[in-house]
Image (cartoon, rainbow, N blue to C red):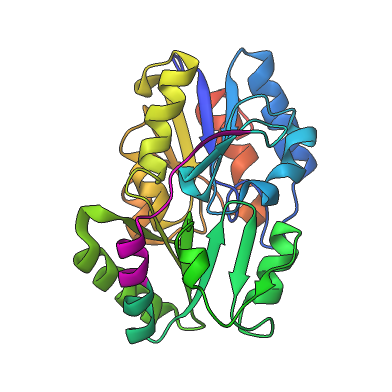
Amino acid sequence: MAGIKLLLADVDGTLVTKEKHLTDRAIAAVGKLREQGIKFAITSGRPPRGMQMLVAPLAIDTPLAGFNGGLWVNPDLSPIAARTLPRDVADRTMKLLQDGGLDAWVYTGETWFVRDRDAPHVSREAWTVKFEPTVTADFADALDRAVKIVGVTDNAERAGRVERQVQDALGDTASAARSQPYYLDVTHPDANKGYAIGYLAERLGLQTGEIATIGDQPNDVLMFRKSGLSIAMGNASDAVKEQASEVTTSSEDEGFARAVERFILGAAHG
């Protein structure tokens, strides 16, 4: 697409498959962007450490937006900026999650805290981010330094209900949106993918209309609304697809690569 100078991509369910595999075609697509002078950046609810394995194969040279923009680092993971939750907001978040029947994780920059190593989704998360959590019975100290609090459940309907409750209760004191159907991410109000667009535009000397975005979850809609071109994955919900300019195939059917080829590079085989 003419005028696009940067593609900002979500990671899970977008850039990688369900099994967290980065395909050869996705790697090649990013290479083709670079050949056309189009930069590439990633943002995710993952901690920066959980994004590092993508830097080398994709030759990423732009800042990484971990925790949906709550922690910005260089590709070598050296810090740029962090936005922690105010302690009173963190405390309210924990109560809201507890009242809603969700388990809670707390991320503080480099450390991930859980109450139970065997709780639902902990093993999957450890496999995804490539490091182990710290088990604690008391989150008190961690809440003073919380970059992200995650509400976790096996019930997607419950996650959606609590998402709305947390958004209503916290208002503009926090950003609350699901990064996966079962994960509700709560971060600083300026730590969301909408703000990530503005941050990258300013840092890289771009207009937001020169940025394309691609994602699959409700928290990606915030960056869709501020970008010049937005692309929803085929595995996204209808509500997410309705907010995007274009829709590609799923993450299991090379949706990321096809989107780059068709909507950004204009390749006929999209």
**Frontmost residue, 40 versus 17:** 40
Q: What residue is drawn where x is 59% and y is 21%?
A: 39
Residue 170's place in the image compared with 188, above or below, is below
Residue 202's place in the image compared with 107, above or below, is above
Percent across and percent down for residue 225 are 31, 39
The magenta-colored residue range is 79-93
Q: What residue is drawn where x is 57% and y is 83%?
A: 137
Percent across and percent down for residue 51 are 67, 46
**Frontmost residue, 69 versus 255:** 69
Q: Tell me if residue 248 can be seen.
A: yes
* Quadrant including the C terminus: top right
In which image quadrant can residue 129 be found? bottom right
Q: Is residue 125 magenta?
A: no
Describe residue 136's horizontal placement relative to residue 162 as left or right: right
In which image quadrant can residue 18 be found? bottom right
Q: Is residue 84 magenta?
A: yes
Percent across and percent down for residue 236 are 46, 58
Q: What residue is drawn where x is 66% and y is 67%?
A: 125
Q: Tell me if residue 183 can be seen.
A: no
Describe residue 252's horizontal placement relative to residue 69 as left or right: right
Residue 22's place in the image compared with 143, above or below, is above
Instruction: Count the labels in the image.
Output: 0
Percent across and percent down for residue 107 are 55, 60
Q: What residue is drawn where x is 75% and y is 31%?
A: 28
